[in-house]
Amino acid sequence: MVRYAAPFRIGFLCIAFLFLSHCTWPVQGRYHYRDTDDVAQEERCHIVEKDETLWRIAQKYGVPLEDIVRYNNIDDVTKLPVGRRIYIPTQTAPRYDDAPDFIWPLIGPVVHGFKRSGPINYSGIDIVSPEGTPVKAAESGEVIYNGDHMAGYGNMIIIKHKKGFSSVYANNGVTLVKMKDTINKGQIIARVGKTGNGGEPYLHFEIRKEKNSLNPLLFLPHL
């Protein structure tokens, strides 16, 4: 095993902490983030009532129906069980006119969605795919982190993009890029693995603007 010199390893950790700030160590395959008053104010929670539809909920809060569907990872809009919590996003993609045109790093079911309310927050999405599936860069940029020094994230890559945006790819089996590599959109940078918490093959994917985590589903194209 290659052992990094202490200053070099510390540099790695500093970069990761800058982009993954406010996190606690993951448990049971999830990446947990402390709740704050600011976070709680960013999102509203609606409890579904009898005979209520998503369209009526969207109208009530003045939020596009599409944003609610994507934000809550709703597969079937006709099935809305009474009592379900529906999170109403106030943060939508149009707030960032300078956002890159991100693409999906891979195609697969999203099993854990982005959440920014409640006692536990989840700063990205988990996309299930067979072990070894190629992981593609969601946008062009430069690799600013490539390592496994963040507990629970496994093999992780962070790519810096223009306008302060970055993307995070974690739980990789193998990584195929190096620090400071210039990456093209769609380039294969890793392969799906299970090196993080949970022990299952999936890609943990995040989009960030400076230090703020954003809901990836609001920036990725429709499938």
Image (tube, grey):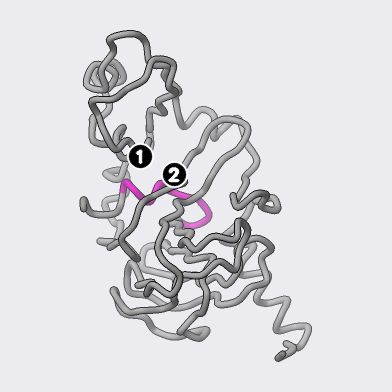
Q: Which residue is drawn at 36% across and 68% down?
A: 162
Q: Is residue 123 left or right of residue 27?
A: left
Instruction: Please give left or right for residue 37 compared with residue 133 in the image.
Output: right
Q: Are marks 1 and 2 in contact (CB under 8 Å)?
A: yes
Question: Which tag, 1 or 2, sits closer to the chain's start?
Answer: 1
Task: Name the residue rendered at 29%, 74% in the picture.
Answer: 185
Specify the amino acid type for callout 2: Gly
Residue 36, percent across and down?
62, 34
Quarter holding the N terminus is bottom right
Q: Where is residue 15 in the image (x, y as percent from the top left)?
A: 61, 70
Q: Name the residue under label 1.
A: 73
> Label 1 is placed on what type of residue?
Asn
x, y percentage for residue 80? Answer: 32, 22
Numbered disc 1: secondary structure: loop
Residue at the bottom extreme, as displayed:
2
Q: Quadrant of residue 206?
A: bottom left
Q: Check disc 2 and report the residue beneath it.
A: 113
